[in-house]
Image (cartoon, coloured by chain):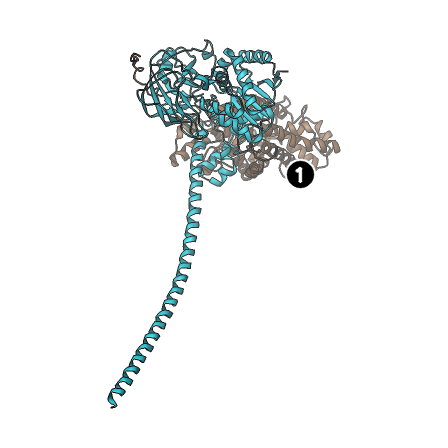
Chain colours: A brown, B cyan
Amino acid sequence: MSEPEFRTPAASPRRFDTAAAPHTPPMRSVPQIMRRVLYALVPAALAYTWFFGFGLLVNFAIAAAAALATEAAILTLRRRPVRRALRDCSALVTAALLAFALPPLLPWWIPALGGFVSIALAKQLYGGLGKNVFNPAMVSYALLLLSFPIQMTQWLPPRMGDLDYAPLDIVEQVRYSLLDELPPGSTVDAYTRATPLDQIKEGLREQRSFREMSASSMIGTFGGIGWEWVNSFVALGGIYLLYAGIIRWQIPVATLAGLAAPALLLHLVDPARFASLTFHLFSGAAMLGAFFIATDPVSAAATDRGRLIFGASIGFLIYAIRTWGGYPDGVAFAVLLMNAAVPLIDRYTRPRIYGHGER
Amino acid sequence: MVDVTLERYLTGGIRLLANKTASTEEPILRDIVPPQLVIALHQHGGASAIPIVKVGQDVAKGEPIAIPESPPSAGVHASSSGRVRAIETRLIPTGKRLRESLCIVLDTDGEDRPFDPGPAGAWPQGREARLERVRSAGIAGLGGAAFPTATKLERVAGRCKTLIVNGAECEPYISCDDMLMREAPAEIVSGALEMADLVGAPLCIIAIERDKPRALHAIRDAAITAADPRLKVCEIPTVYPAGGERQLIELLTGDEVPSGAFPYAIGYVCQNVGTAYALHRLATRGEPVTSRIVTVTGGGVDRPRNVEAPIGTPIGYLVERCGGYRDDVVRLIHGGSMMGYTLPSDDIPITKATSCIIAATSGEIRQSYEEWACIRCGDCATACPARLQPQELLVAATARDFDALESLGLDDCIECGCCDVVCPSHIVLTDRFRHAKRLYAEHARRLALSAEAELRHKRREQRLRLSEEGSRAAQEALKAKLRADNEARRKAIAAAVERARQRKRRDVQP
């Protein structure tokens, strides 16, 4: 047999970098999620501005500036990367939710303080993004409500054509906010009005029937006048978040169900003493709470069953505070209370791991 | 009825870009003979095979060059004809990582001269003899783990409820099973039935993901032709990781493999379609495993396609046969883009575990490893096919809280990578869990060592105490003996004195 002919091996080997699996790129990012939450609030912000003037936008601008400045300052003190944290847009989302919660007519230092408190006390003191136990916007809202009850309950009536004065334009709004000046000859009391939730609560306390009150001009087609549309647009944004996969259905559905179930039941039992289902769902911060606040992933339950419990409890607490509590609306307190219960809920609602125990 | 379409879904799992079309446009490239082969003797868990050739020896294609040691092990055969140049340790790819193995370096002669095994190559009668033949022919799981098939079949033989032939191929980029099913459906079906005979399975399900209509069609036709009542072809939803052994069993049967156990414990066995094809070739033509289908793909390969590559073909040569690299290759991946690992160089030979080689460009793979903090969105938990809570595992892994890691099921993590891909904070979860598993193993080892040391210490104390007590007794005994001796001596002296005195008295008296 002849000597086999040895052929030369391939060219010199090529070198490559190594990295850990998986190599598939991530599907999305935190800033993308936060930006989408902000986009989802745009229709509601337009509706709010249409009905209640430019206060929301002014408050948002001030709260956002304060929140971003606070975040930058604290991160600098903590020697953490600043620009990256500011770019994640989480402070803007907090400021936006706070602005939606605040009454529109406020001196500048209240939204500024709110922005500061939400980032400094409720977020950075816990360790920054992802570490806070409580919803930052709700912490600062609750603190402001307890500290400044007068300013924090000065709500405006919706623009519905029957106002006896001209609503503030954006320049007047900014002048009031920064300089505490209203157009000549008018006072704050001329502008402010109790919210529908407040009026119904007061009325029911005075033994007036819900049906009689709902015939008044404060109540619209299915909720508080003006508020029903703001809530509808908030819900629209929430449905976009569901569609985009930013939030999952459990928390909003459970929250609304937790609010709707007692509302429907008690209204059926005694329609005079208990407000209707649609009034509860489309007044105050019901939709904002269900779709945007309770769904804040950091402070919400993380398991599917846990989210149902978390949401339903918030919904029921909102109803309980509105109906039997001291405040006309209860979203902030309901959310904060359930935030505290999250570790417990998560611990006891973990799904059964594959291959463990009985089906 | 042959056909079953499953509409059941996995718990968890994700939908991914398949990236499979590029490599399925051309038929499988066959009959390539690289100038040099590096054939690994230890391609899987278990024991290495023992070389039976010498340097300088001429071998034919299919000739045994190493024989299996104690199971699980598998024989190794020359993948082409030529001369043994060296027997040395090289870096080779296994299912999960690169490792060193003894390799036979073979300079090929280009003739691909086949080996004639004679009557020993015939398919024997009887289960035991056949399984032994499967072992010596080097048949191993060609889905990517390369676990010796004979061992896997032996374990389940006699108690097998269902043989699952896995054609799901859920990982992105990999298309070797798809192409094989298209080109050799009858052989796969015949091999699957042969396997069903070997384990005595009353049911044999061939499972194929919905995104492979041509493979499904081909296998269906072959199954109808085979007309075996045990055979079912099942179309399953396209979701990653439906092709994982545990996930496929859950998807097809609703049963779960108990944590820490293997499928045979509940009467199932999964075999890859490539393995079924290899078994068919062994049973009908007496051919051992000398090649496998490898997908060579990625944006960095000029002509992505599937190649029937001799075991031991250097990866660089394989890429060369597919048109070579394009310029911007940033990473070379062994396996799919989810569970595959990167290779530092293309001077590495393929093994039976090499299903796919991806020459990835910067646009198609993850490059930035910057992270945000976990925002507890829970997407990872939703995606986890093992139903773990990766966000909690992450906290426990960072804190090195081993008790929490254990109760959160770290050991049940299959490292599929779903959590990484869905994480909006871009946290490298899977690799942290891999690392945590190693730390946990180390921790468990230390715990065992310290428990052992404690036991040893206690035993020593006991022993010392006993020996102390023992020595005290011995001392007493010695003292008593000494005392007795002294007494005896004193008596002896006194007696001597007395005797002397009497003698003196006698001497004094006249």
Q: Where residue B384 sits: x, y (%)? A: 52, 28
Left or right of A170? Residue B63 is left
Q: Where residue A338 sits: x, y (%)? A: 58, 37
* Quarter of the rendering occupied by the C terminus of chain A: top right
Q: Secondary structure at mark 1?
A: helix
Tell me the quarter of the picture where residue B353 sits. Answer: top left
**Residue type at numbered disc 1:** Trp
Q: Residue at x 44, y 39 (%)?
A: B400
The residue tagged 1 is A324
Is residue A343 depicted above or below B267 in this figure?
below
Outermost residue toward the top in this view: B26
Is residue A132 depicted above or below B500 in this figure?
above
Q: Residue at x 34, y 74 (%)?
A: B488
Q: Is residue B237 visible?
A: no
Q: Nearer the viewer, residue B400 or A328?
A: B400
Q: Nearer the viewer, residue A307 or A183?
A: A307
Q: Specify the subunit that label 1 lies on.
A: A
Tell me the quarter of the picture where residue B298 sits. Answer: top left
Left or right of B83? Residue A256 is right
Outermost residue toward the bottom in this view: B510
Is residue B144 depicted above or below B497 in this figure?
above
Q: Where residue B53 sits: x, y (%)? A: 35, 23
Is residue B17 depicted above or below A133 in this figure?
above
Left or right of A329? Residue B492 is left
Mark 1: few/some/many CA within 10 Å (<14, 14-19, 20+): few
Q: Where residue B398 sits: x, y (%)? A: 44, 36
